[in-house]
Image: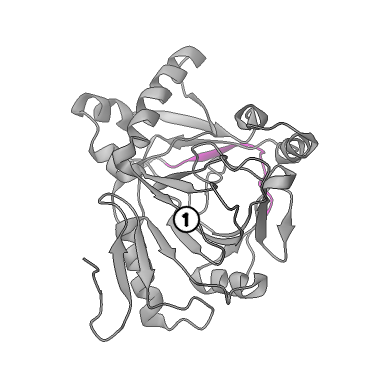
Amino acid sequence: MPTTLQSATAIAFTPVSARIGAEVTGVRLGADLDDATLAMLKQALNRHKVLFLRGQDHLDDAAHQALGRRWGTPTRHPTAPAQVGDFLLELDSRHGGKANTWHTDLTFMAAYPQAAILRAVTIPPVGGDTVWANTAEAYARLPDTLRALADGLRAVHSNDYDYAANQTERDEGTDRYQAEFIATVFEAEHPLVRIHPETGERVLVLGAFFKRFAGLSEADSRRLYETFQGHITRLENTVRWRWRAGDVAIWDNRATQHYAIDDYGNAKRVVRRVTIDGDISRGIDGARARQIRPDVVPELRVI
């Protein structure tokens, strides 16, 4: 049944699955959101990890960016091409803009984004869904022995990975996108188990940008990665959203991974995203993430 956080409003949050995701009704997104509504949305995001809103066709690029400023401090992507306006990232399937790997955005940064606001611009007639996984639930449901192991691990993440290997269709656009994506190599070392700065939950920080575990061989790192990643992406721990043009998804990037399914052939798919600046991740021992490469990270925040 839908749950309403404040009886004086018409805003409702209906869970899409038991562990992650809720559809929001009664909200017209924009920079003119009142403080109470914005607080309700953020509270619901902490609980559900992903919020879905249909029928937000009134948002154009300018309004989308204005909403991002209302939510927090937007940040530009440090390497990806096809950025629009001040800080809007376009993902266009015709130009290599596919994200069909499980990942948390920008974990090759010590302070990766806290949230993302994604707007569907052009959706193929079939396929093109996105799936999210709850990394807090994944940690909480680990066997005790694996949880104890995870608590002590630190992982190196990098943008220099084989992006093209995950694409179902290789073309010049894919190769060009990858070349721009790794023009500057970023690496950061994170605790595998992060304390969420708002909820206090323990979450797993993994995904496609993972490179190795500190102090372990590549082979041992990969085996452990597959073990923990497998717990994150269990189907029971995920939610799948079937897009319509004008939909908006807002997710907590500190407590989720996502995967854009490339199952729409040569059809056109365009989505645009605003990301909100985050803080440096901190492990259960209080140790923080550190940036390995580059030594000096360019200023990416946009006010």
- Looking at the image, the residue that sits furthest to the bottom is 8
Q: Residues within 10 Å of mark 1 (few under 14, many from 20)?
A: many
Is 294 one of the magenta-colored residues?
yes
**On screen, 288 above or below 32?**
above
Answer with left or right where residue 17 lies relative to residue 246. left
Can you give x and y, in whole percent of width and height, for residue 54 in the image? 46, 68
Answer with left or right where residue 46 lies relative to residue 132. left
Can you give x and y, in whole percent of width and height, for residue 136 in the image? 31, 45
Q: Is 7 or 65 nearer to us in this picture?
A: 7
- Looking at the image, the residue that sits furthest to the front is 125
Can you give x and y, in whole percent of width and height, for residue 97 in the image? 67, 45
Q: Is 223 or 172 nearer to us in this picture?
A: 172
Q: Is 16 or 75 nearer to us in this picture?
A: 16
Q: Is 142 or 280 nearer to us in this picture?
A: 142
* Residue that appears at 56% across and 45% down: 106
Q: Residue 157 falls in which quadrant of the image?
A: top right
Answer with left or right where residue 8 lies relative to residue 51. left
| Residue type indicated by callout 1 | Gln
**On screen, 284 above or below 144?**
below
Answer with left or right where residue 165 lies relative to residue 44. right
Magenta segment range?
288-299
The residue to which callout 1 is attached is 114
- The kind of secondary structure the magenta stretch mainly shows is loop
- Answer whether residue 281 is visible to the viewer in this image: no
Can you give x and y, in whole percent of width and height, for residue 104 in the image? 49, 43
